[in-house]
Image (spheres, rainbow, N blue to C red):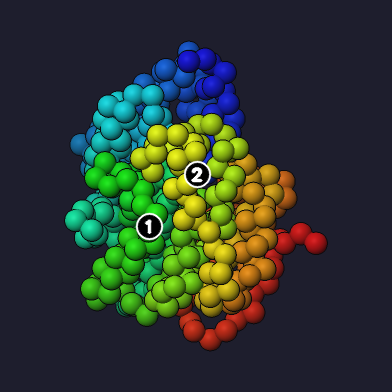
Amino acid sequence: MSKERVEQVINQGVHRFLADGVIYRDLMDIRAAMPDWSQWCAVWSQFAAAAEERGAQALRLSFTRTAAREFARAALYFHYAQNLFYDDLKLKRETHDRKVAAFKRAAPLLEPLLEPMKIAFDGVEMPGYLRVPPGRAKPPCVILLGGLDTTKEDYLGVNDLCVERGLATLAFDGPGQGETLFRMPWRNDFERAIGAVLDYLETRPEIDRGRIGIIGRSTGGYYAPRVAATDKRIKAAVAWGAMYHLRNLASIPAVTRDGFVFVSGSKSVEEALHFFECINLEGMASKIRCPLLVVHGGLDTITPMENATRMIAEAGGPVETLIWEDSGHCCHDRAHIVRPGMADFMARVKGESTPHSYPRLLWPD
């Protein structure tokens, strides 16, 4: 359980940590305080608990905005305490539950508030949050879909950007994700869960059910285009870290590879490789007719550049791109451009069925 692994994971994830809202000073203090990997969960949790206590103090003084953001920060730090941490599953579950509890304290205090809801799917209830911007009649709605060990809670930054642009959002935990992981592992028909989300949104009169988009992050960068290809209710899609296939699973960083093995209920990398053969857009990408935004980094070690180029080449509708050859997974090092760009894309498209011509913003020659 070496310090070397701590440094490796922090170096690999630093841009994502900061983009999601981790304070730089906190991250440096967490790094310094962590003697080795065995303390990863404990040290992050200490900083999470401190934020939660600040939130409680602010709430006692009726400083609700401060309380909301401190509770949300606590949830984010608890999230990273257990994110891709499989050494102690009991501790992972306990820390995950603390994350969920902290975010539940934030949700009603944030402006606009996040409404907790549950979506029935194959005998379980997938938890999520619906958020509707104030003063907008029948706004479009964006489904926020996570990837491996990413959840509705750590999507708050993108959620905020969408709502600021007059878009409603629905963030949820699908099979193998967040709260649902402990009720249902990842499924090779995961897209059916997104279909259940679309069914649920059709019951919500406060949104425009004819203008629904989806942003899929990491592994969601496969399922978002997949659903766009098969369900006409999706009017715009973002592949945030495009994943045409996952045939390279055996060669991705070990901490991430172990996560894919775990969430699929596999016993080995070989078994997980067989399971994730379901991730394959061959013959499907050409069926994507709605506007598609592909966000990708040329140095991505989880989903190679080939995944983006094939998706772009084969998509059957208009494609816009945000791509840097010197960027990593999901372009977290360009978050200040990418995340507003995704929200702007959704705000511009707004689910209209008329074909558009979108500029290729940063596609390399």
Image coordinates of residue 118 in percent, x first then y, are 22, 57
Instruction: Give the image quarter of residue 233.
Output: bottom left
Mark 2 or 1: in front is 2
Image coordinates of residue 97 in percent, x first then y, are 26, 36
Q: Assign a secondary structure to mark 1.
A: loop
Residue behind mark 1: 190
Q: How far apart are marks 2 and 1 (CA)?
A: 16 Å
In the displayed structure, 251 sits above or below 330; it is: above
Q: Give the number of the disc on residue 273.
A: 2
Image coordinates of residue 67 in percent, x first then y, are 29, 41
Q: Which amino acid does label 1 sit on?
A: Phe
At label 1, counting other C-alpha atoms closer than 10 Å, the crowd grade (few under 14, some 14-19, many 20 or more) is some
Q: Looking at the rendering, in which quadrant would you find the C terminus?
A: bottom right
Image coordinates of residue 133 in percent, x first then y, are 34, 66
Q: Which residue is drawn at 40% across and 34% down?
A: 267
**Residue at the extreme right:** 365
Q: Of 325 and 281, which appears nearest the observer?
A: 281
In the displayed structure, 30 sits above or below 219; it is: above
